[in-house]
Image: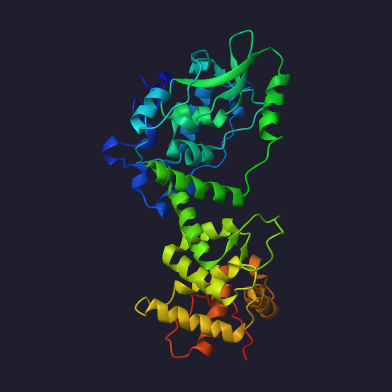
Amino acid sequence: MAYHPKITAQFGPDLFQVLGPAVNRVKWNSLSLSEQKRRLKKMPEYVDTRRLGKYPTLVDIVIHCFNELVNMGQDNPLLGIDLPVYNSLVQAAQVLNTQSLNYNASNLQPLDVLVKNAAKQRDVFLRHIFEDIILRFNPGLVLPGVGRMNSKGFLFVNDAQHRIIGCIMVGIEQVPINYITSDEEFWDVAQYAAINIHSLLASEFDRYRIRVQREKEARAAGFPSEPEDGISFELSELFDDLGITVTERANKGNGNSLVLTGIGNMIKYRIDYGEDFFSRATKINARLFSTSKFHTANSWGLMEFFKYQDPTIDKHQMDYAIMNALRKRWSKTNGGGQMHKQIKDCYNQQTGSDATNSRIPEAAIIAHGIYQVCLKYAPDVNWIEPYWDNKFTKFTLALV
């Protein structure tokens, strides 16, 4: 049966109105990572569901979210995407060749009884549902929700709203929820607070650490892995080769030499610039400032600089020339913080604009400083100037 009848009545049995013609659909995993990111960025981050009343059903919330996407027309990020469809969590586990949790049958709830206390619960974060649940759907990770059953037989979902909405969107007909029986709305607030307020959120470092470990274990078990897990694992191997220590921002016990606390930035740069530029920039940064804290902005500027250089030049020779040029300008191995800071300070002093809040992107400013250094100290290479909008004033970095 799959999708709830109210959903198929409005959008078609195969969600034609949401996804478009079936013959034009492609699997999400067939898209490049950049295309996936582009589509996810277009996905509405937040959907206001309070207009649906005090106690909307979760099925009506799903219909409301689908309408938000349909109303985007050609900008609908799900247009042309072949979403998975399952009847149950057990069937999903069979299709995906994985595990489902051993749910107590009495806690598998039908969709028609599921409601939300709109005044007590948050609205829907739609991008999160697709990015973190549907597009990496794993029935073994659909943990039971928490709720309250009232005397009229309605089950108020106070935790796992997004997981359950995700299940409904892929056709799951019964979802696992543990609940208490009460007519007191106090429990709607208390259950939500216990899970969403009095808990410790994962940091950027912890997300990176877990992604690395999940990739290792997926490879060992022969399970499919996720693209960002693979990227995190790739980064961890590069960092190990270079002696870079990734840690929490609050961890002060590792000294300074090649300590990296901005792992979230590095993952973003890797996705934006690709493996080659990322690896080369990271190596130059680490080897140039080997006794300094690892400053991600230096790598960022180098990656931006690489974008404009002649790809026919041997990259090993190019990187050697860049590192030697930068070493003539910043000779101290503990001066990692000085490179990007001095470039940005110079830009600020000469233009009156803060590099972190400028019409010229910060990465372009750092890249232009690198270009000036390379032009001066490695003149034998045919360096190409990074793009700079001529409407805006350039700056001249002090060189010796």
Q: Is residue 26 above or below residue 175?
A: below
Residue 316 higher or lower than 60, as above or below: below
Residue at position x 43%, y 39% in the image: 135
Q: Relative to residue 209, is residue 245 depicted above or below?
A: below
Quarter of the image for residue 156 reads: top right
| Residue 16 in view of the camera | no
Q: Position of residue 285 (x, y in %)?
A: 55, 72
The image shows residue 383 at horizontal and vertical percentages of 45, 83
The spot of residue 30 in percent (x, y) is: 33, 47
Quadrant where the C terminus is found in the figure: bottom right
Residue 56 seen in this snapshot: yes
Q: Nearer the viewer, residue 201 or 156?
A: 201
| Quadrant into which the N terminus falls | top left
Nearer the observer, 220 or 36: 220
> Residue at image x 49%, y 43%?
43
Q: Going by the picture, which residue comes out furthest to the left?
A: 23
